[in-house]
Amino acid sequence: MAGNSFGSIFRLTTFGESHGRALGGVLDGCPAGITLDIDAIQNELNRRKPGQSAIVTQRKEPDTVEIYSGIFEGKTTGTPIGFAIHNTNQKSKDYSHIKDSYRPSHADYVYDKKYGFRDYRGGGRSSARETASRVVAGAIAKQFLNAIEINAFVSQVGDLKLEVPYQQLDFSQIESKAVRCPDMETASRMEDYIKDIKKQGDTIGGIITCVAKNVPIGLGEPVFDKLHAELGKAMLSINAVKGFEYGSGFSGVAMKGSQHNDQFNTDGSTITNLSGGVQGGISNGMDIYFSVAFKPVATVLQSYDTIDKEGNKVTTQGKGRHDPCVVPRAVPIVEAMTALVLADFMLLAKTNKI
């Protein structure tokens, strides 16, 4: 299986399966001499881990990261940072009923057809549990980036939308609610809705918005390695993601060029920021903001029709512990992937100046 690495210089390779002994990764290219706050790394994992509230999967995992290399006396050494997160609460028997059949809209069918074999326990490598490794690496990237602030939050669940512009939000409130929406009234409605969906044995999708502040001018290349293109790739690599838009996004098509153009201030900043902080594939110093759409989780705890390995139609029912809505736990994942992209481009920019 190829495609287990992400990044050019600041490069992460992940390993492990949902019901294997452990997940983990090797982070290469992190510069030496960075003081790492291990508690901050663990806190990011705690934001992603299962069982943290009534609106997420109840799988109980401590998700404690163990770092095996690349750090000495609290600082990075410049060598590969190897780490692991051990699985402790697998219930593989919950998946025995799909050993010979496929869940609709899941990776089961294509994995079997591509590789001729699949780990059906929790989806194996296709499980969103793989993203725990990304969160560790992203937490390290955040500490390397230092002055750059990255905040993601839930802006929509189903039809429930947060109508307040991000500039008017208090990001310190993101963690105040389990759904991770910084508007308390909207957050409460979202949580009630997710609980109702869960009672139905069903799932619902949502949108996460991310804002990166204090990004320097000049990150990204003008042709194939555009900054927003790499951010899009990063977000679309996350499980269940179905869409990515930055700046004005799809709404910009209804505007005239005279309306959409970001006029300059004398210092080079812009009066508006419909470009989303990126022009010509290169960061312009304004806030980078984008939204990521997540589909409803494929595994529903209801009876459904599908096919088995022989192509026979069968009826089965979802079992096990699953998120009724993935977006609350995906917030730190979006932040992590954003940090990995920005860290990589920071190092690329430094290399190009040498």
Image (cartoon, grey):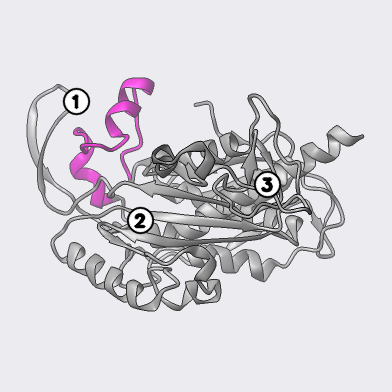
Image side of residue 234 versus residue 224, left or right: left
Identify the image quadrant of residue 228: top right
Q: CA distance from mark 1 to mark 2?
A: 28 Å
In magenta segment, residue 112: yes
- Type of amino acid under label 1: Lys
Residue 290 seen by the camera: yes
Residue underneath mark 1 = 309
Q: Position of residue 205 (x, y in %)?
A: 29, 52
In the rendered image of this protein, does residue 216 appear above or below residue 187? Answer: above
Between marks 3 and 2, how big is the CA–CA gap?
24 Å
Marks 1 and 3, how far apart in space? Answer: 43 Å
Seen in the picture, residue 142 relative to 81 is either above or below; the reply is below
Residue 133 covered by magenta stretch: no
Left or right of residue 55: residue 104: left
Position of residue 340 in the picture relative to residue 238 (left or right): right
Whichever of callouts 3 and 2 sits on the residue coming sooner in the sequence is 2
Residue receiving disc 3? 342
Label 3: state its secondary structure. helix
Q: Amino acid at mark 3?
A: Leu
What stretch of residues is rendered in magenta?
Answer: 93-121
Of residue 241 and residue 123, the one placed in the foreground of this image is 241
Q: Amino acid at mark 2?
A: Val
> How dense is the environment of label 1, judged by Cα within 10 Å: few (below 14), some, or many (20 and up)?
few
Residue of label 2: 326
Q: Position of residue 163 (x, y in %)?
A: 37, 64
